[in-house]
Image: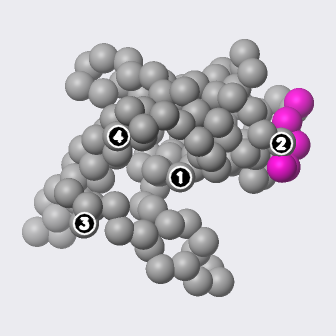
Amino acid sequence: MLGLFQKKKSGARNRRRFMRVAEKNAMLNVDGVSYAVSDWSLDGFLALGYRGGLERGDEARARLVIVYKGNPEGFDIRIRILRENEETRELAGQFLDMSALARRNLELVYADRVAKMERLERGARG
């Protein structure tokens, strides 16, 4: 299972360590404000609907809610804001800290999402 979580090699163009998973039905609640999640990985997120109030470098408590196997799964996470843009209404951030149980469960959801993406990609090519 560890092979799924190998970090991407970082370079000047791509600083992300993990493949991003596109989401259609996930929310991130930061300090009482909910945002739709566009995509996420094991170390960060891109959320939509940003209306201000957070700035680059801010740290906050957040709750990531992802629908997994038909049920909402919540993950309490400490985050750091990496980028915010009121014009595009995007908010990007890094996951800083979560409990070991939350991390393990998030890894399970992530592994499932990545496997589905890879199956779809193989099907599109073949």
Q: Mark 1 — residue? A: 43
Q: Which mark is residue 3?
A: 3
Instruction: Name the residue type under label 4.
Output: Arg
Q: Earlier in the sequence, mark 1 or mark 3?
A: 3
> Can the viewer see residue 46?
no
Please give left or right for residue 96 compared with residue 71 in the image. Answer: right
Q: Nearer the viewer, mark 4 or mark 1?
A: 4
For the record, the magenta segment spans: 53-57
Q: Mark 2 — residue? A: 58
Q: Mark 4 — residue? A: 104
Q: Position of residue 55 (x, y in %)?
A: 87, 43
Specify the farthest residue to the front: 100
* Mark 1 burial class by Cα count in 10 Å: few <14, some 14-19, many 20+: some
Instruction: Name the residue type under label 2.
Output: Asp
| Nearest the eye: 98 or 113 | 98
Q: Residue at x 60, y 72 (%)?
A: 15
SS at badge 1? loop
Q: Residue at x 65, y 83 (%)?
A: 12
Q: Earlier in the sequence, mark 2 or mark 4?
A: 2
**What separation in Å lies between label 2 and label 1 (alpha carbons)?**
16 Å
**What separation in Å lies between label 2 and label 4 (alpha carbons)?**
25 Å
Q: Are marks 3 and 4 in contact (CB under 8 Å)?
A: no
Q: Residue at x 46, y 50 (%)?
A: 42
Instruction: Name the residue type under label 1.
Output: Asp
Name which quarter of the figure residue 19 lies in. bottom left
